[in-house]
């Protein structure tokens, strides 16, 4: 664990921003699904509402990870990496679509890969106090 006196690297701040962006997007989509499930005319209101609740709950994970990254908490790297990896799944699906969805897939993949690169950077792992495997000498 790091102390508050340790300066936070810019790459770690950027990784927290990317994780926070993903979390906010999930929460926004979840709230939209909830509102449309309640006020709109979906085919299945209960399915729309459950999907909305699920997305809001899933959005809390990268938001908590982003806060942990900003506070230099080592536990926050795992949830952030998992969120970025899971973001690659819808990105791949969108890349195989047509029209404007391909551009959305490219943007989504770029965000996920950027977050992963920032989190596996040695500067970030060192700032979070994460050590590599012990080497036998």
Image: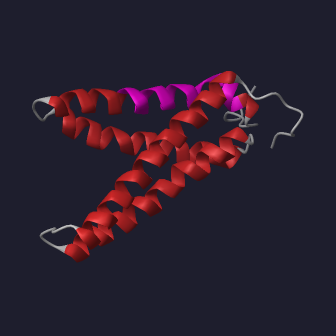
Q: What secondary structure do most residues of the magenta stretch adopt? A: helix
Picture quarter with the C terminus:
top right
Q: Where is residue 36 in the image (x, y as percent from the top left)?
A: 26, 64
**Relative to residue 5, is residue 89 drawn left or right?**
left
Viewer-nearest residue: 134 or 109: 109
User: Which residue is found at the position 9% from the left and 32% from the top?
Assistant: 98
Q: Residue 120: give x, y in percent of width and height.
A: 57, 29
**Color scheme of the displayed model:** secondary structure
Depth check, front residue: 89 or 4: 4
* Residue span colored magenta: 110-125
The residue shown at (44%, 40%) is 84
Above or below — where is 135 with respect to 39? above
Rendered location of residue 35, percent (x, y): 32, 65
* In the image, residue 51 above or below residue 23: below
Percent position of residue 97, x then y? 12, 35
User: Please, which residue is most extreme toward the right here?
Assistant: 5
Residue 112 left/right relative to 64:
left
- For the point 50% across and 31% down, the residue is 115
In which quadrant is the N terminus drawn?
top right
Residue 135 seen from this side: no
Q: In which quarter of the image is residue 107?
A: top left
Residue at 34% x, 33% y: name it.
108
């Amino acid at each position: 664990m790091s102390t508050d006196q340790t300066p936070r690297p810019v790459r770690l701040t950027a990784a927290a921003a990317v994780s926070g962006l993903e979390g906010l997007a999930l929460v926004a989509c979840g709230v939209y699904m909830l509102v449309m499930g309640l006020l709109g005319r979906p085919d299945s209101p209960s399915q729309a509402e459950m999907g909305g609740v699920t997305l809001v709950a899933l959005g809390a994970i990268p938001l908590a990870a982003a806060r942990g990254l900003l506070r230099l908490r080592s536990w926050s790297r795992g949830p952030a990496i998992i969120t970025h990896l899971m973001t690659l799944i819808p990105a791949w699906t969108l890349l195989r679509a047509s029209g404007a969805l391909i551009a959305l897939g490219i943007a989504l993949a770029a965000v996920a890969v950027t977050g992963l690169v920032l989190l596996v950077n040695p500067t970030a792992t060192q700032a979070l106090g994460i050590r590599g495997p012990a080497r036998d000498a």
